[in-house]
Amino acid sequence: RAFWEVFLDVGAGDLDREPAGVDALVDQDIGEVVGAGGTFHEFFDDPAREANEKAWKVLEAWEKPFLTAFSDGDPITRGGDKIFQSRVPGAKGQSHTTVKGAGHFLQEAKGPEIAKIIHEFIVATP
């Protein structure tokens, strides 16, 4: 079964491609905020803001190994890898990677490659 079908219990038939118009959901200002070292939920009217700020407090204290493996073709999370790498202590010195040729649904497009990246990270990390 597809990743999202298992975890979100939705039909896998809709997951063969990224949703049409995903690029239209990305506001240029969001990319600038993320690229400038901001977070994904920095807008005052965002109902997830409080939870996001709490999550960053936990992540900014995370000393255990932390790997980023972002897509090179996701306009929504573009630049997020650098934010995690700079703000999460456990990310320092890790062998971060960018997965080529995938979009927003990275685990759908490149599932075996992601699994290999994670496996190699676990094996190499004491």
Image (tube, rainbow, N blue to C red):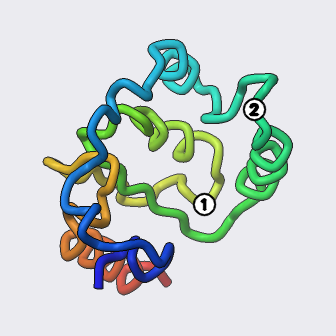
Relative placement, left or right, of 19 versus 45 is left
Q: Is residue 106 above or below residue 27?
A: below
Q: Which mark is residue 40?
A: none
Depth check: give the residue in front, 56 or 15.
Answer: 15
Depth check: give the residue in front, 93 or 74.
Answer: 74
Depth check: give the residue in front, 93 or 35.
Answer: 35
Spatial CA span between label 2 and label 1: 28 Å
Mark 2 lies on a secondary structure that is loop
Please state, as top left, top right, bottom left or bottom right, where the N terminus lies in the image. bottom left
Relative placement, left or right, of 75 versus 100 is right
Q: Is residue 21 above or below residue 55?
A: above
Disc 2 packing (10 Å; few <14; some 14–19; many ≥20): few
Residue for point 84% across, 50% down: 54
Depth check: give the residue in front, 32 or 82.
Answer: 32
Residue for point 20% across, 64% down: 110
Q: Is residue 92 above or below residue 22?
A: below
Residue for point 19% across, 76% down: 112
Percent x, y of residue 86: 57, 40
Q: Which residue is mark 2?
A: 46
What is the total number of numbered labels drawn onto the structure image? 2
Between label 2 and label 1, give the one nearer the viewer. Answer: 2
Percent x, y of residue 53: 81, 43
Disc 1 packing (10 Å; few <14; some 14–19; many ≥20): some
Q: Which residue is mark 1?
A: 90
Mark 1 lies on a secondary structure that is helix
Q: Amino acid at mark 2?
A: Asp
Q: Amino acid at mark 1?
A: Gly
Residue for point 20% across, 70% down: 113
